[in-house]
Image (cartoon, rainbow, N blue to C red):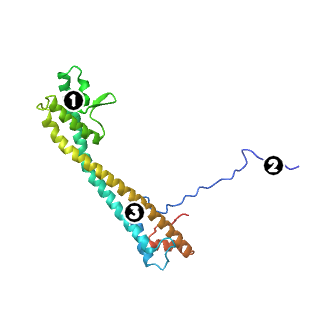
Amino acid sequence: MSTSVTGPDATAPTTKTVRRTAQLPTKAVPLGILATTVAGKWQASPLPPLLWLSKDDFAAQVAVFVASHKEADAAGNARSPQTKRLKALDKQFDSGLRYVKGYLEEEYDDHEGYYGEFGIEKVGKKYVLPLSRPERVEALSKLLAALRKHKFDKKKYGVAYWQPLYDEYAPLVAATTETTGQRSGKVSQKDQGAAQVRKGLRSIIHHVKANYPDTWEAELRGFGFQKESFGG
């Protein structure tokens, strides 16, 4: 009679986790550098084109990707000074608004009833100018008109205080909105270009492996891929 032993003493099979080195850089700048190198090496190599991707097409894709990355960065840099100045102006609005509310409180018992006329709205438990900057531009226009209507325009925090701020703020908001839209478009173009470039690079890796089954590691290094392992 034979018996089989099972239980905690039995040796369970173990599964080893295989870690593969990343095939391609994750960041845009090193990806662009690698892709530019590979495109040039492929052009000069006897390795034939792919059925779906020619050498010239890949070089063109890489050039567009690198250019779009630079344009996206430039658009982001252009937005930074504008955003910084807008934040400074927002602080001046918040500082001056409390005096305007003070004028209303001195003049009217139901002063909060006039807030809407001055572009002031309730956000949470506070009465402030709208948080959205395009809406804030409209609110500032209302505030200027209301200051004149209620004879607050000559006060310290009247038109002389608000008009120069509005004149600077309104075009800055418009310019920032345009810059943000441009940057979003550039980032989207860059992301799409990165995906296409990665697809091409991965295909070239497999192309090299298929054509150089014994020396593919050295060939890949010659193409610009400097990793010792390429996974997949």
Secondary structure at numbered mark 2: loop
Left or right: where 33 falls relative to 83? right
- Residue 210 point in image, percent of width and height: 56, 73
User: Which quarter of the figure is the C terminus placed in?
Assistant: bottom right
Within-10-Å neighbours for mark 3: few <14, some 14–19, many 20+: few
Q: Residue at 37% x, 68% y: name it.
A: 63
In primary-sequence order, the first of circles 1 and 3 is 3
In primary-sequence order, the first of circles 1 and 2 is 2
In the orientation shown, which residue stands out farthest toward the front? 149
Q: Which residue is mark 3?
A: 30
Q: Is residue 38 visible?
A: no
Q: Nearer the viewer, mark 1 or mark 3?
A: 1
Q: Nearer the viewer, mark 1 or mark 2?
A: 1
Which amino acid does the dot numbered 1 rest on?
Arg
Which mark, residue 4?
2
In primary-sequence order, the first of circles 3 and 2 is 2
In which quarter of the view is residue 18 placed?
Answer: bottom right
Which amino acid does the dot numbered 2 rest on?
Ser
Q: Which residue is mark 1?
A: 98
CB contact under 8 Å: marks 1 and 2 = no
Which amino acid does the dot numbered 3 rest on?
Pro
Left or right: where 174 falls relative to 228? left
Q: Residue at 14% x, 35% y: name it.
A: 159
- Residue 93 point in image, percent of width and height: 22, 36
